[in-house]
Image (cartoon, helix red, strand yellow):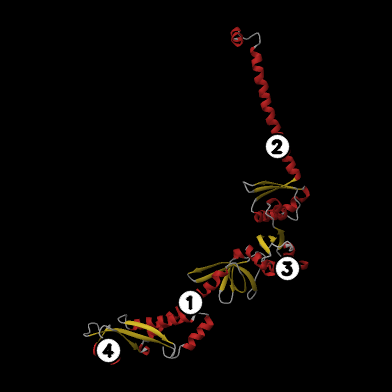
Amino acid sequence: MVGNLNHIIDQVVKDKGIDRDVLVEALESAVLSAANKKFRNTRDLEAHFNDEIGEVEVFEFVTVVDEVQDSYKEIDIEEAREVDPDVEVGDSLGMMLEAGSFSRIAAQTAKQVIIQKVREAEREGVYSEFKDRVGEVVNGIVRRYERGDLIVDLGRAEALLPSREQVPRENYRQSDRVRAYISEVKMSAKGPQIILSRTHPGLLISLFSSEVPEIAEGIVEIKGAVREPGSRAKIAVISHDIDVDPVGACVGMRGSRVQNVVTELRGERIDIIPWTPDPARFACAALAPAEVSRVYIDDEGQAMEIIVPDDQLSLAIGKKGQNVRLAAKLIGWKVDIKSESRALEEEQEETAEETVGEQIPQENGVDNASAPVAAEEPDAPEGVNEKTEE
């Protein structure tokens, strides 16, 4: 407890990145805790850090009285005037205690409190630094695997790349560098937890934003992005400048810009699509490279039926339905794709059903029309004919 603490405080502030005031408050709290333990909380104590001498000073406060009733919290007026000649009855007098009088156990308690405060300050510092960085792409170093999850060193903190957020084809070894998207930052009982992702569409958007200056400047805007991580992705872009081609800006000269993103995503194929507010036109662009014959839209159900040439059906659907699945996610509508021959068959079936439906009421009409004729036959009773004539 003796000695200049300024050097130690400055070193901890530099190494741990903790605010000096927080550390000083922790020291004061630790020393006060040790003092209260020493005197069994029988005295009114306060601890203050003295910057000039670099020590935490402990003061005992007692009330000046004519006759002492509680020796721990009161002091006689005559004895008090030996410390401060100007003191009066009812005043509160503070007297500094010798910190060296604290027991070894009390000093150990102070050390534990300091360690705890420093750890809490570190956690709060890390949380404050990363809580506003959700959506950013960060670089880290792989440290180890824990039950399939990857522990990544970000410098001031360790982050978690869960197995569900990893691309199946990607493998990492210790000390490998990894670039990932911060998807979540939360405070847990063990401290701040930073969750990373390699599968989030935001990673694709962030990579394009860093590679394409027009996106960073706001000239080109990314309207949407969808991925099947490690396999294929689609991104929709629009330009706010008629002289700038949004697709060309993202592709770059000889494909340099998009190739950098593909390399970072370990060969993931990327389709760059011009965005348009017309859902039919946007759907046609989203299904590229397949050609579209016609589109039927159901605005209420947010669904569309897309007809493609027979030789374009497999291309439009894609491998295991990947192309149409990504297109539907990007558009945000339900998409049903049919070939022209299939659509023609369905139209013919519907026409046939309508024709049959129209013929059934006509036959019934003939039967109804013949009923009165039967009443005029000779076998009918005479009374019926007479009433009819009347």
In this rendered view, identify the residue nearer to me: 58 or 118.
58
Residue 287 placed where, x, y %? Answer: 72, 54
Give the mark nearer the N terminus: 2 vs 3.
3
Q: Say which element carries label 4.
A: helix
Mark 3 is on which residue type? Answer: Arg
Residue 286 placed where, x, y %? Answer: 71, 55
Q: Quadrant of residue 61?
A: bottom left
Mark 2 is on which residue type? Answer: Glu
- Please name the residue that numbered disc 2 is placed on: 350
Q: Nearer the viewer, mark 3 or mark 4?
A: 4
- Please name the residue that numbered disc 1 is placed on: 121
Give the mark nearer the N terminus: 2 vs 1.
1
- Please name the residue that numbered disc 3 is placed on: 257
- Please name the residue that numbered disc 4 is placed on: 80
Q: Quadrant of residue 167?
A: bottom right
Q: CA distance from mark 3 to mark 4?
A: 81 Å
